[in-house]
């Protein structure tokens, strides 16, 4: 039995089967490449669902982590530490907002945004107690907590996890009229992914985000943009909302904010929104810890240069030009923006993912018929072209 087989057998035996990973066991990684326990190298075209935007073991980020590891890693929020103030100040500036509430995982940040919207709705907007509603969209993916799956339309995420949390209204993604009809005086927030990642990299119709912004403004409702996957350079701009010149009331960030090293997430908004929280009303022992803040500060500094956004714009245009030439008898549709694509196939996507792995490229299927591509933004054009060559071979079977 190979080392890979041995380790996978252990995983199968003792790990809950909540994922269906490709049959590979990674031991090392650098940039856009990973190496398995048997010494085989693969080009990573998934980047941990955008958590590794800046590449595996990015030297700037690992050095920032090492420096902080030798100093202090956790004090809880019972005390301040010397990385916290600079982190929240720099992230607020990046987002053009006043305040930051740091958490760890993306789902935690979404839950925080939902609590924020409800509390703001009761205490600022004046919604009657217990009447607040938040509008979400079909095909959404914001995490898998019990509250979040309550408004999911994905049976795998939702079924058998009830009873479900009330207070949500779900409308078709991209449908402005349905959104308008669903809003009323008790609507405290509209939670939207500027591009739906898990659903297959669904890009909304042009002007949709602007219409969401205008409806929220007209109705005194918070526009909450979940930029956990789409933000921090993935689509060719710092935030996917930037493509329509839209500024939401609330940003939700995660994944790439931790540089692929630490889980780091945050909710960012102005003082009139996040200022509703008082001590003891929300928190996290690990949220905003010194190690996380040190890494995230380096991520923010890297984003200020526009280098990674530019790489995503330029390489993304090249990638989409090549994907647009894939044969229509194999590919139904290609969606996406920047270095992010969903390739909708006529048949099952899992066999294509497995063939790609055999060819040395790691990608992953979603919702049966879609292959997602989201390479690290540091990928070279040569490596990207090689990966797309292998995709063409894998599609032929």
Image: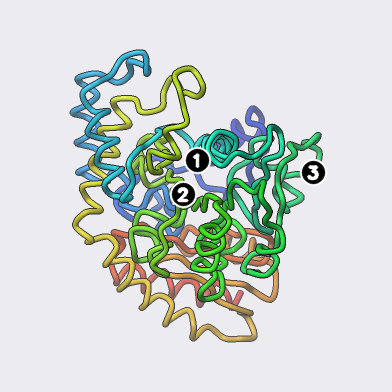
Residue 120 visible, this angle: yes
Q: Residue at x 60, y 78 (%)?
A: 333
Residue 106: mark: 1
Which x, y percent locates residue 383?
33, 67
The residue pinned by badge 2 equals 228
Residue nearest the observer in this picture, 198 or 231: 231
- The vertical placement of 28 against 214, above or below, is above
Give how far apart the Cα atoms at labels 2 and 3 are. 24 Å
**Disc 1 packing (10 Å; few <14; some 14–19; many ≥20):** many
Q: Are marks 1 and 2 in contact (CB under 8 Å)?
A: yes
Count of numbered badges drawn on the protein = 3
- In the picture provided, is 156 more to the left or to the right than 34? right
- In the picture provided, is 308 more to the left or to the right than 362? left
The residue pinned by badge 3 equals 159
Mark closest to the chain's N terminus, 1 or 2: 1
Residue nearest the observer in this picture, 328 or 283: 283
């Amino acid at each position: 039995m190979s080392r890979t087989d041995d380790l996978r057998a252990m995983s199968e035996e003792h790990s809950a089967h909540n994922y269906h990973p490709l049959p590979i066991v990674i031991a090392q990684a650098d940039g856009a490449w990973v190496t398995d326990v048997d010494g085989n190298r693969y080009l990573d075209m998934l980047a941990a669902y955008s958590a590794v935007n800046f590449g595996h073991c990015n030297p700037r980020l690992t050095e920032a982590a090492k420096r902080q590891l030798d100093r202090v890693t956790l004090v809880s929020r019972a005390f301040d530490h010397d990385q916290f103030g600079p982190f929240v100040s720099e992230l607020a500036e990046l987002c053009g907002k006043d305040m930051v509430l740091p958490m760890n995982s993306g789902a935690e940040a979404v839950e925080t945004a939902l609590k924020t919207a409800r509390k703001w709705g009761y205490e600022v907007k004046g919604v009657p107690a217990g009447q607040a509603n938040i509008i979400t969209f079909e095909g959404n993916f914001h995490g898998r907590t019990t509250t979040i799956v309550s408004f999911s339309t994905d049976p795998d995420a939702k079924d058998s996890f009830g009873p479900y949390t009330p207070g949500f209204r779900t409308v078709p993604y991209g449908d402005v009229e349905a959104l308008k009809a669903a809003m009323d005086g008790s609507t405290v927030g509209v939670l939207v992914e500027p591009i739906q990642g898990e659903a297959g990299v669904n890009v909304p119709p042009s002007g949709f985000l602007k219409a969401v912004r205008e409806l929220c403004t007209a109705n005194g409702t918070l526009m909450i943009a979940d930029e956990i996957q789409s933000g921090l350079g993935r689509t060719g701009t710092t935030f996917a909302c930037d493509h329509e010149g839209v500024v939401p009331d609330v940003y939700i960030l995660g994944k790439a904010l931790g540089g692929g090293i630490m889980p780091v997430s945050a909710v960012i908004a102005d003082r009139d929104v996040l200022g509703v929280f008082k001590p003891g009303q929300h928190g996290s022992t690990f949220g905003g810890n010194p190690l996380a803040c040190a890494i995230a500060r380096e991520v923010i500094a890297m984003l200020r240069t526009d280098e990674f956004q530019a790489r995503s714009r330029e390489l993304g245009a090249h990638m989409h030009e090549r994907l647009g030439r894939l044969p229509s008898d194999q590919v139904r549709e290609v969606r996406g923006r920047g270095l992010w694509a969903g390739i909708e196939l006529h048949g099952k996507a899992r066999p294509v993912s497995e063939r790609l792995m055999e060819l040395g490229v790691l990608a992953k299927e979603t919702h049966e018929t879609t292959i997602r591509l989201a390479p690290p933004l540091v990928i070279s054009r040569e490596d990207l072209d090689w990966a797309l060559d292998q995709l063409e071979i894998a599609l032929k079977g």
